Amino acid sequence: MRTRAPKTSILLAALRACLCAGLCLGAGAAQAAEGTAAPAVNLPDIQRWTDASGAVVSYIGAPELPMVDIDLRFDAGSARDGAAFGIASMTSGMLKFGADGMDAEAIISAFAASGAHYGAGASSDSSQLSLRSLTDPAAFKMALDTFIAVVARPDFPDKMVELRRTQALSGIRARGQNIGTVGRIAFRKALYGDHPYGHPVGGDEDTVAALTAKDLARFHRAYYVAANLKITIVGAIDRAQAEAIARRIASALPRGEKPPPLPAPRKPARVFVHIPFPSQQAHVFIGHPLIEVGHPDAHLLGLGNRILGGGGFGSRMLDEIRVKRGLAYSSYSYFSPRRVAGPFAAGFQTRLDQAGQAIAVARQVMDDFIAGGPRPEELEAAKNNILAGYALRFAGNGKMLGQAAYIGFYDLPVDHLARHPEDIARAGAADIQTAFSAHVHPDRMVTVVVGGDAPPSVNGETAASR
Amino acid sequence: MLARKTIVVAVAFACATLTGACATSPARLAASASQPAPQHGVSEFALANGMKVFVNEDRRAPVVTVQVWYRVGASDEYDGITGISHALEHMMFKGTRRYPGDALSKTVKRAGGSNNAFTGHDYTAYFATLPANRLELGIELEADRMRGVIFRDEDFAKELEVVKEERRLRTDDKPMSRLYEQLAAAALNRSPYRRPVIGWMNDIENLTLDDIRRWHAQWYAPNNAMLIVSGDVEPREALRLAQKHFGPLPPAELPARKPQREPAQHDAREIELAAPAKRPHLALAWPAPAVGRAAEPWEPYALWLMSATLGGAETSRLQKHLVRERRIATSVSSHYSAYRRYDDVFVISATPLSNTSVEQLEAAIEEELAKFKNELVDEAELERARIQVRAGRVYAQDSVVGQAMRIGRLESLGIGWRAFYDVDAALAAVTPEQVRAVARKYLDSRRRTKATLLPQDKDANAGA
């Protein structure tokens, strides 16, 4: 007899301790003391299994709304482009333009007529397809049949490939008018160089112009295979239905095999470069590659980053650059663990004549944080934010889907979502300071500035012109 | 399966009211005398001071969003102080006596939540998403700052700089944003939607703290605001807390609002923006009335389906013909909203592919419009558009925050939140003849505004 997996209830004695010790700023303490009993957070029950085809499936039953979400992720991101920059992106975008003998109009109409939302795209690590459908049987059948045809049997018709290629080239040209995009592309290149993460996901003009339908079909055959697939299903269907859906999708694909691991990026050289751009603001990006998903220090770096610049108001980057000095509207730090070391970056946008000053402030903020670690009240606040607010991460089918698909794609254990708050509760200021010292090195960072004509100067050093 | 109370949220196909009983209201709550049972999971109340309260029950997760929407925005501004509603929104985060400085945001975060705000033409909204057991905190914080915010010169000086950076980031350094800002100002003479919400730069530079104080005093009153609570919440409890924290705040006499009707357009208008862009862009706009503002009540619903079939979906005529078949546009779409408080426009946006000039693209669009006015759309095309609305309504139930925002928006526009659920009959009644009729009536090139973005060599005169 199949029994439902036990629900994971995180009452968290640690959480209670954090809330009781929490200080409240200002005279509103009396009111804020309400609710110190930690709410029991029932994590969604993620059931995970491996289909006979090799695809790994995660499922969460959510019977309240008559809808279902299906997320497919292949280890087929732009990191797998090889020399054909943009092929992963174009392949994912092409799928709906012809499949199983249906032309683009038929496919688009089928999704529309069933009320379904279809999506496809590529990032550095993955190609992703999504389907959101009503569970009404006729609608769901139409949507799912079309979805399976699109993922498993795309035709890549020459005329449509030509269309997509022309559109992609137009988009690539348009990048040059968006100062933020120009900056991000230059930053990525400076961080990763020739590493598979170093080029734009959408490719470049010369590489995209050379892509043919045969190339796309070859990429699809190689990477859109069951052994390389993570399926996540959330919605008003039961386990048996989820198994059947996953089986249908996975068995429509060849079994295939997983691609080899990606190489670890090399540490970049320290650079300070300026790219001219007709603008009133300078966009600044400062950082270097950091860690991969699953790194033992991930939660410490995450917690620390929340305090440094990832937590909005109250985080140091925003407080020092925006609130105290009025230098920017947006000022942040983030890091994005990937299959191999993903980027860490601090950044902001400011009036051209303020760029040098703002860069100096940002660097000082990072230096101070790495040297001293978080203050006790900062750490308390950040922990409380994560622990007391943990249920917010699972509020709704879409959010549950995102969480389950992420841990599924990166092969994190199902209990990761339960263990994470425990790791957070245990983290100490010294642990965070140690982790930052070990991993974050401002003296080896890349600084890219885009905007205006003249390269900015910081502490006597002028950016090199590009 | 989530081990929570699974009270089924009312959905489009099986419209059941919630099982939550509507208890009689004690006299001292002074809530509105008639309390209808919740419909679609939404309960509606009014406090004695005029503040409306909406509670949307969604028990799927122990989460709640607390939102206060003020009925003030760029539409209420005038020349010389454009951007003031948005600047005031920034200043509302500078603290009160009870929660000084950034204590409000810090308190929300410590409680496990997140918060933010935004300004539009017709509303300024403040929202916090919190664990469900911190409902009172969310309500208390908004009630505290409604009248309790403290304005300081040093905060204002810095925050004005932040607002200028925001304008540079969102508009001044983005050729497309500049184009659409100019389009609004050209297509509309009088309607307040002609004004950018962020304000014109010179107006921003000349805002004073006294301006902000007056604007706040005029508009931030309970009778000009609504509280929206959405999530794992018991409506009577939300009402009790609303009364406790907002009840004591006195109403204010609000300035009279003028209709600000757009005079009928009888002229064709053209603007051309040369800017540092890499590819050209074309936008065409025609005046088009929203619900409650048209000669015939069915016209806005016909315009809704006209937009959907003409350019508003991937299956639409313009996208199919110009993007996929003729291959002269890399993208094209149409935009229309049936729910507006003031007069607005129907817009077609298009980017040519490199083999096509903007003039050629414009000619092709007008060709398509001529065909559209001469033919009838299929009933199947109309039904596809209706299905999008019905399915979208189911999907929209998944977001607690989204549901609250929709209530806030529709109420601020004077349409009423029920429109989201009650629109099916009006859309079902639209005929292909009606769609053709509104296309002929409103898509007249003699009453059209055309805006073109032309890439400018960046080495040429760089005066922005």
Image (cartoon, coloured by chain):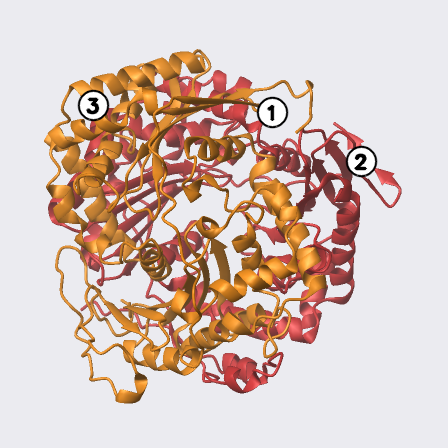
Residue B140, given in percent of the width and then of the height, sits at: 47, 77
Classed neighbour count for the residue bearing mark 1: other residues with Cα under 10 Å, few (<14), some (14–19), many (≥20): many
> Please, is residue A379 above or below residue B160 in the view?
below
Classed neighbour count for the residue bearing mark 2: other residues with Cα under 10 Å, few (<14), some (14–19), many (≥20): many
Q: Which residue is mark 3?
A: A101
The subunit carrying tag 1 is B
The subunit carrying tag 3 is A
Q: Earlier in the sequence, mark 3 or mark 2?
A: 3
Residue A463's mark?
2
Residue B381, given in percent of the width and then of the height, sits at: 16, 31
Q: Nearer the viewer, residue A448 or B431?
A: B431
Q: Within the image, what quadrant is residue A374 found in? A: bottom right
For the N terminus of chain A, the quadrant is: bottom left
Q: Which tint was used for chain B?
A: orange
Tell me if I can see residue B5 in this picture.
Answer: yes
| Kind of element beneath mark 1 | loop
Q: Nearer the viewer, residue B260 or A30?
A: B260
Q: Mark 3 is on which residue type?
A: Gly
Q: Are discs 3 and 2 less than 8 Å apart at CB?
A: no
Q: Which residue is mark 1?
A: B276
